[in-house]
């Protein structure tokens, strides 16, 4: 792959869009999986049984945003492949979000109005598939996000497809068939518990066998129907479902109120750091109306970027 030139693709997000802030959630990522460094986002992706490295940067401005995507190897990029790459990058960086409507509707809330100014142009990322969001959410159950991410990276590098570019290794996120057929001891060597390993194997097998079409949930308008159907699966509880919906479906109305990290963020911003209940977190979410998912993302980024 090192000999190949790159295919350049330009995308034009709906303004305003701050690529640097939006990509900052990946700044502490694993350089062999995905990372944002020196103004460029790197990730290996799979498109129609082909594997590519994408390098994404933004030569535009917040008010006139442009995304430049370099794809290697160039020789595999036919028109159909390019269309799918555009769809995937557009989804990862959520370039179609209408932030102005979000800002306008929540302008009366002092906390969100302040965060909207400080994080102006932030569009929080989305996983390329709901499957990825679900597996990540299972791994994150009952452990800190920083620890969970390290386990996720280890699993990806043990099971994902390897591509090489410029003497560096990059690993694609493993597809359901691969995780369904990965032995438990591999998961355990990556640091996962036996129970979580079995959960991931089980749900991956259901998807690989076409007994579960998890991507169909994108077409559902009623979020409660999505939660109910997801929770009917043994390995998925409400917290896992809500987190998966927020990250994998980019629903503005998803708000994982039971999430410990979100509870801490809500406490810090709305209750002066006092101890609060899940119901109090959910009440704050209801104040945000249809934008509660975006509000959760802005709270997460505010903590990530140490915004006072």
Image (tube, helix red, strand yellow):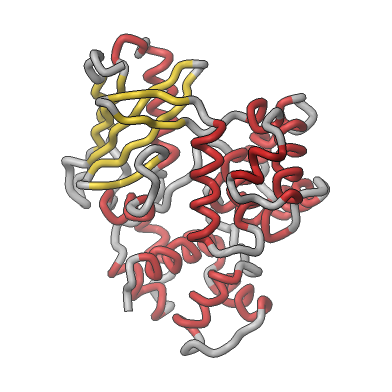
Q: Residue at x 75, y 56 (%)?
A: 237
**Residue 134: percent from the left, percent from the top?**
63, 45
**Image quarter of the N terminus:** top left
- Relative to residue 224, is residue 274 drawn left or right? left
Q: Nearer the viewer, residue 281 or 273?
A: 273
Q: Name the spot of residue 231 as percent of width and height, x first.
A: 78, 51
- Image quarter for residue 114? bottom left
Q: As displayed, is residue 178 above or below residue 135?
A: above
Which quadrant holds the C terminus? Answer: bottom left
Measuring from the top left, give residue 139's x and y in whole percent.
Answer: 62, 51
41 versus 52 height, above or below = below
In this orientation, does residue 184 appear?
A: yes
At x 70%, y 42%, the residue is: 200
Determine the residue positioned at 62% across, 77% down. Answer: 283
Can you tell which quarter of the image residue 66 is in?
top left
Relative side of 15 to 247, left or right? left
Residue in the picture at 46% in, 16% down? 50
């Amino acid at each position: 792959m090192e000999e190949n030139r790159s295919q350049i693709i330009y995308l034009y997000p709906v303004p305003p869009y701050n690529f640097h802030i939006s990509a900052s959630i990946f700044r502490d990522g694993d350089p062999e999986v995905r990372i944002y460094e020196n103004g460029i986002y790197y990730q290996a992706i799979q498109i129609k049984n082909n594997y590519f490295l994408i390098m994404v940067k933004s030569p535009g401005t917040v008010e006139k945003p442009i995304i430049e995507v370099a794809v290697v190897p160039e020789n595999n990029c036919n028109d159909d492949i390019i269309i799918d790459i555009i769809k995937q990058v557009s989804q990862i960086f959520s370039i179609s979000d209408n932030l102005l409507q979000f800002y306008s509707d929540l302008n009366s809330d002092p906390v969100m109005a302040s965060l909207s100014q400080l994080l102006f142009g932030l569009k929080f990322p989305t996983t390329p598939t709901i499957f990825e969001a679900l597996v990540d959410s299972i791994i994150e159950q009952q452990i800190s996000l920083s620890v969970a991410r390290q386990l996720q990276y280890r699993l990806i590098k043990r099971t994902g497809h390897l591509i090489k570019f410029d003497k560096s290794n990059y690993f694609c996120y493993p597809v359901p068939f691969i995780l369904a057929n990965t032995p438990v001891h591999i998961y355990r060597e990556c640091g996962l518990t036996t129970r979580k390993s079995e959960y991931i194997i089980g749900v991956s097998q259901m998807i690989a066998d076409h007994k579960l079409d998890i991507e169909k949930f994108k077409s559902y308008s009623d979020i409660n129907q999505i939660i109910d159907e997801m929770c009917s699966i043994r390995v998925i509880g409400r917290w896992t479902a809500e987190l998966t919906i927020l990250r994998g479906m980019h629903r503005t109305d998803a708000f994982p109120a039971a999430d410990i990290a979100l509870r801490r963020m809500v406490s810090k911003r709305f209750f002066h750091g006092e101890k609060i209940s899940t119901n109090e977190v959910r009440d704050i979410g209801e104040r945000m109306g249809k934008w509660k998912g975006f509000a959760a993302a802005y709270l997460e980024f505010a903590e990530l970027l140490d915004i006072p």
